[in-house]
Amino acid sequence: MRTLRLSVVVPTYNRSEVLRVCLASLARQTLSSDQFEVLVVDDGSTDDTESVVRSFQGALLVRYLRQPHNRGRAAARNRGIREATGDVVVFVDSDVFPVPGFLAAHRSVHLASPRAVGRGPLLLTNHLDDPFGKPPLLPDPSPAFLDTANASVRREHLLAAGGFDEEFRHYGWEDADLGLRLRRMGLRRVYDRRALAYHYQPPATPESVPELLQKEEERARMAVRFLRKHPGLASRFLTQFTPLHFLAAFLLTAGGVVNERNLASVLRRLRSHRLAHLVARAALNRHYLAVLWREWLELSRPTA
């Protein structure tokens, strides 16, 4: 095989415990260590992220890049793209744990197709101690052309597209936005099942509900930005801003019987992690759609 080096860009913010598992997974790749580098972009963390990264410098060709303050995932990934030395940038979030053949699979995608956007499957796990040895929770599919939990793009194409839009300051949709621009450049998505990774999501608990609701509110506000930037039916389906999705949210929460106000108490009564995850996702998604509708109406209201 001809030379093709990879740069793995991992943005992170105050997730050192999870990042440690991510880096340990990257250290166990079947791809030769001289064929890839890892760039951890610390987006202003206040925990021990730096020391965790430094502890892997013997096992990985890893670089620690620190943002002076928290600027969001789009800015963090752009920093990684700028400083990458590889031909292909592989995007992995700090809560994503690639299987050993992950990087070799992404590399083979780009060796076969120089205009590819590499994608692989994600499985949800709520295990940090042995994510590969314990049964996954559920598949974690994404309809987006680019999903930066598990994706790869040639660096030249990322630069030509202008990178991530850093106005997506909060959680969500910055990768979907870049994906649309890459697709308009004529790139094609290539899916390789061997590029498998596990996406860590801790079990939803009553104590975590406020943080989870805040995340959905951020996702809704960024969805409004995405919709205004990319108007049209395709964007509405991607962000679930259609009557069909509102109806599905209504039905999946039993007409709103399970909602953001009582989710914590509902979770206290559930013993199955899988059922708790499904119930929480339904209620959280309903909350996302409610905030999305409210924010959309607010922006659409005529000003005096």
Image (cartoon, helix red, strand yellow):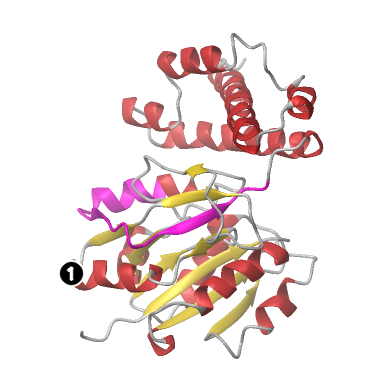
Whether residue 41 is situated above or below residue 200 in the rendered picture: below
* Range covered by the magenta-colored residues: 177-202
Determine the image quadrant of residue 297.
top right
Where residue 61 sits: x, y (%)?
52, 86
Residue in the foreground of this view, choosing between 113 and 170: 113
Q: Between 134 and 12, which is closer to the camera in this rendering?
A: 134
User: Looking at the picture, which amino acid does disc 1 mark?
Assistant: Ala
Up-down relation of residue 212 to residue 118 (above or below): above
| 245 horizontally vs 46: left or right | left
Which is nearer the eye, 166 or 42? 42
Whether residue 194 is in magenta: the answer is yes
Between 38 and 252, which is closer to the camera in this rendering? 252
Q: Quadrant of residue 277?
A: top right
Q: Residue at x 30, y 64 (%)?
A: 157
Q: Position of residue 7 (x, y in %)?
A: 43, 76
Q: Is residue 44 visible?
A: no
Q: Quadrant of residue 238?
A: top left
117 above or below 299?
below
- Which part of the image, by quadrant, shows the C terminus? top right
Residue 186, given in percent of the width and then of the height, sits at 20, 53
Residue 3 falls within the magenta-colored stretch = no
The residue at 67%/17% (across/down) is 258
Q: Residue at x 63, y 50 (%)?
A: 126
Q: Is residue 304 above or below residue 23?
A: above
| Pointer 1 residue | 112
